[in-house]
Amino acid sequence: MLITIVAIDEEKGIGKNGQLPWHIREDLQLFKQNTLHHSILMGQTTYDHMPRKLRDRHTYVCSIDPEYQITDDPEAEVIHDLEAFLKQHQDDEEEVFVCGGASIYRQSYPYCKKAYISFVKGTHDVDTYFDAFNMDDWIIEKEVEYEQFIYREMRRRKRRLNKARLGRRGARI
Ligand SMILES: NC(=O)c1ccc[n+]([C@@H]2O[C@H](COP(=O)([O-])OP(=O)(O)OC[C@H]3O[C@@H](n4cnc5c(N)ncnc54)[C@H](OP(=O)(O)O)[C@@H]3O)[C@@H](O)[C@H]2O)c1
């Protein structure tokens, strides 16, 4: 199963200059708690901007560049075909956490059945957004409020057919 894990502000902001726009200790602790000893997926930009490698997590790093290699991190594996990866892992029993950035969140959004989101209070100086995110797609299963954010674990809402778009016999019109 693919799970998107992200911290997002009230205008869907998630990043600035390749970095997180904030430093929230409790959010980083939650990220570690959720992802430790699991597989994680991220884009090359997010991976290369991390101050240090994330230990004890198998890290799939996306790059379109066939020359892109990671030689100093034995837990990292480069993925060139993101769509194939998403299709292959969407129904896995194993949890794979989608850890950004913006382009990876956007492309993986339809494939993620769960979302663990820290809703950061207020708006921030950002240049990167998670535009695809829509609260209407999700059902909240767990919610914990912290001083700077509200953490929610959510599962994807099953799509219901809009009755107004159905004929009397239930056929689509
Ligand atoms: N708030 C949060 O929770 C959070 C979490 C993570 C990241 N972020 C923020 O997000 C920002 C970075 O986002 P971003 O969109 O610029 O970068 P990104 O998604 O981290 O990485 C983009 C790169 O991923 C590769 N890629 C994209 N689509 C691909 C595909 N279909 N197949 C294979 N590789 C693919 C490409 O690498 P190549 O150029 O090598 O081909 C592309 O340049 C940063 O500011 C970061 O701090 C925020």
Image (cartoon, rainbow, N blue to C red):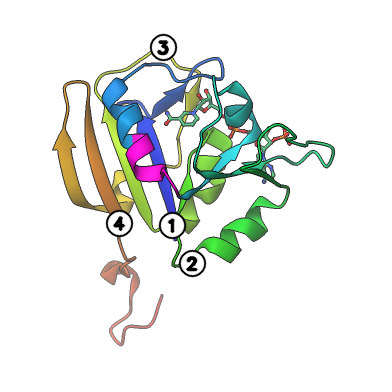
Instruction: Specify the amino acid type for callout 4.
Output: Arg
Q: Are marks 2 and 4 in contact (CB under 8 Å)?
A: no
Please give the residue where the numbered disc 3 appears in the rendered image.
125
Dot 3 crowding, Cα within 10 Å, few <14, some 14–19, many 20+: few
Residues in magenta, as a range: 31-37
Q: Earlier in the sequence, mark 3 or mark 4?
A: 3
Q: What residue type is disc 1 on? A: Glu
Q: Is disc 4 placed on a helix, strand or loop?
A: strand
| Residue 22 placement (x, y as % from top left) | 37, 16
Tell which tag, 4 or 1, sits nearer the viewer.
Answer: 1
Q: Residue at x 54, y 62 (%)?
A: 89
Q: Nearer the viewer, mark 3 or mark 4?
A: 4
Q: Secondary structure at mark 3?
A: loop
Mark 1 vs 2: CB contact within 8 A: yes
Left or right of 142? Residue 110 is right
Disc 3 vs disc 2: which is toward the camera?
Answer: 2
Viewer-nearest of discs 2 and 4: 2
Q: Quadrant of ligand 1?
A: top right
Percent coordinates x, y for residue 103 in the rendering: 58, 37
In the picture, which quadrant includes the C terminus? Answer: bottom left
Q: Which mark is residue 92?
A: 2
Q: Which residue is mark 4?
A: 155
Residue in front for this viewpoint, 12 or 17: 17
State how far apart marks 4 and 1 are (Cα): 13 Å
Badge 1 element: loop
